[in-house]
Image (cartoon, grey):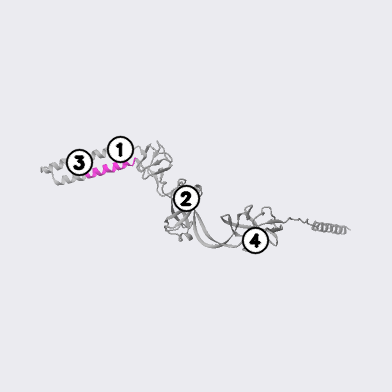
Amino acid sequence: MKYRSVFFILLFIIGLLFGCQQSHEKKEPAHTVNLKTVEVEVVTVEPQEALQQTEVVGTVQAVNRAVIAAKVTGTIEEIPVTLGSEVQKGDLLVKISAGEISSKVIQAQAQMEQARRNLDREEKLLKKNAATGESVKSLKDVYRVAEAVYNETKTVLGYSTITAPFTGLITSKKANVGDLATPGTPLLQLEDNRKLQVVTSFPESLVLQIKPGDLLTVLIPAADLDIQGTVAEIAPSADPLSRTAAVKIDINDAPQLRPGQFARVALPGQNKDTLFVPTSAVHSFGQMDKLFVVDKNKAHLRLVRTGSIKNEQIEILAGVDPGEMVITSNSSQLVDGQPVSIAQ
């Protein structure tokens, strides 16, 4: 009796589960949505020949740039320039306290003058046969050594005054009066903003397509300039890490140009057939773009990959085939499968 009761309970549970499964499988009949017909304008997509371009990024820089650093150690006494100051060639930039060097110059000068007097006295004695030629020659050597030491110390003293090597603008100032200047430490940066160039890097697969003197299109967004630049320099070797070669392109000066601005350089490529549609046909869909094509009087949604935009035409890289009719009007509110009529 005990086992029989367990058997009937199991049958009951199985029957209950089977009935629940069948009830879930029964679905309510779908409601049919009647979509209204929308009149649209279309364009038939045909391949067009277009020039393919590759863009590389670069930076506007001055052709003549100089990092001003000290050659001697000392306290900075004077910096008569500020950030953005325009200086002429030879203008004072930095003056460094050089009391110790000045003392050495005075000492070397005194030793040189003493050697000169000793030499003059010995030469007079030689004329009177009161001295030997060897002693005169020895004093000449002493004088030349003293003169060389004097010239050396005077040159070192000149390092305490730093002047502009060319006309330009102060674009960086890293020191102030009272700071300790040490050899090799940058104090200022001077740039000649009258002659500029774009410095960029070309992929090794493209660098062989250009040569010095070629004209390339340069776009500088910050200055709203689209100009022609001349290839000035091409690195003879490529960077083994980035597989690119440095290229310098000379550009004409303009009031809105500044060193450090971002630039794009266009490399002309080969003509290639591609598809273009009006920009009004394409709409953003999250992180993607979409458009609608007409097939059998119905609108069908297509997710597309777009490219360049030119003259209110946008390039379609994927998602549409040649010969298809793309909707160009009233497409923002369409849904997939909606009936459409083509405007005559």
Of callouts 2 and 4, which one flags the residue occurring earlier in the amino acid sequence?
2
Question: Which numbered dot is residue 207?
Answer: none
SS label for mark 4: strand
Of callouts 1 and 3, which one flags the residue occurring earlier in the amino acid sequence?
1
Out of 253 and 209, give the one closest to the viewer: 253
Which residue position holds label 3?
116
Q: Quadrant of the N terminus?
A: bottom right
Q: Are marks 1 and 3 in contact (CB under 8 Å)?
A: no
Which residue position holds label 2?
59
Horizontal side of 96 relative to 227 (left or right) equals left
Distance of label 2 from label 1 (alpha carbons):
44 Å
Of callouts 2 and 1, which one flags the residue occurring earlier in the amino acid sequence?
2
Q: Is residue 282 visible?
A: no
Percent of width and height locating residue 260? 47, 47
Of callouts 3 and 4, which one flags the residue occurring earlier in the amino acid sequence?
3
**Range of residues picked out in magenta:** 143-160
Which residue position holds label 1?
102
Question: Which numbered dot is residue 325?
Answer: 4
Distance of label 1 from label 4 (alpha carbons):
87 Å
**Image quadrant where residue 101 sits:** top left
Residue depth check, mark 2 versus mark 3: number of the one nearer the observer: 2
Prevailing SS of the magenta stretch: helix
Distance of label 2 from label 4 (alpha carbons):
43 Å
Classify 10 Å Cα crowding around label 4: few (below 14), some (14-19), many (20 and above): some
Of callouts 2 and 3, which one flags the residue occurring earlier in the amino acid sequence?
2
Furthest residue in direction left, as rendered: 128
